[in-house]
Amino acid sequence: MTNVTLFTAPKPFTDAHINVIQRNAIQSWKALGSAVDIWLVGDEPGVEEAARELQVGYIPQVLRNRSGTPRIDSIFNLVREKSRADYLCYVNADMLIFPDMLLALEEVRARVDRFLIIGRRWDAAVTELLDIKEGWHQQFQPATLATSKLHRAAGSDYFLFPRAEFADIPAFAVGRAGWDNWMIYKARCEHMAVINATGTIKVIHQNHDFSHFANGRIHRLQPESAENMRLAGGRYTVYTIHDANYQLDNYSLQRVRLNRWKLLREIVIFPAVTLHCPWLAKLFYAIFNSKRLLKDRQQAKEAQRFAKEEQNEKRS
């Protein structure tokens, strides 16, 4: 089996529910066996203790932005230095992973050299520590999927790729919106096979609230999400799973078929993906997404207002 490094930047383990679901996630990764090594990045409260207890790798000295949030570029670079695996997989710390991910990787690597594997998640209510041991997934995964909800395609929770890829990531803030979309944009621009593996890899997200944010607002409304968008280059870099050019269904890799919607989308992203021309890509985005531009401006104003409120709170 191919060696894979799973890595993440966990939230603090101080909240009781976050503590439970992050431990569940990490234990599910460990259950994948010796083909996988695991790294937790960042010195948030409880991370070092959890890494020691769960016997996984720990990297405390991550670079942070002005708000103190760990940076994606630093997380990736630190793990690349520590890991010797051929493939890396960033995964959010609340995600349950199962052996189907490793089996999917074997199929993909036999077919293409440069790729990014992504997929939609299933949202489930998990409130207690799970009894994770060998073979635990055989009953848990299908039973939980039967009562779970498939998440929309706008967000991505794992990124599996060869270790040489994504060596020049901007200084995005982890846990905020925009950087995951940029990963898909970057892969398409680099002419990698962007593979929607939703039909094969069944990852389960353990639901939680957003109380870990000081203001309790969802991540996409955080001021740092607006900064992520600026670092990405603008809204035209917001790609989703729908922008994959391959799909993996039941371990069969196929090119995504062009229907009317997909053909139109490929025309819209052509200046970015093929011509590598940012100004033309922005123009195409504006032409084909005129209604979205109004929402973009509203969200930008909200983010600026939230940022001012936070600054005023800190001063007071």
Image: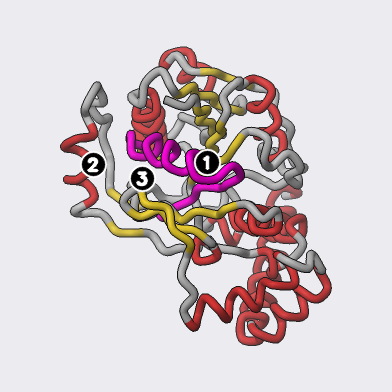
Residue 102 % position (x, y): 40, 34
Q: 78 or 110: nearer the eye?
A: 110
Query: What secondary structure is marked by label 2?
Result: helix
Q: Is residue 49 left or right of residue 308?
A: left
Q: Earlier in the sequence, mark 3 or mark 2?
A: 2
Q: Earlier in the sequence, mark 2 or mark 1?
A: 2
Which residue appears at 21% of the width and 29% of the height? 136
**For the residues marked 3 and 2, what is the alpha-carbon distance in whole angstroms?**
9 Å
Q: 188 or 43: nearer the eye?
A: 188
Is residue 111 covered in magenta?
yes
Query: What secondary structure is marked by label 3?
Result: loop
Residue to which mark 1 is pinned? 160
Task: Give the label on residue 91, or none.
Answer: none
Question: Is residue 259 at least partly visible in the picture?
Answer: yes
**For the residues marked 2 and 1, what is the alpha-carbon distance in whole angstroms?**
20 Å
Residue to which mark 3 is pinned? 203
Task: Give the label on residue 141, or none.
Answer: 2
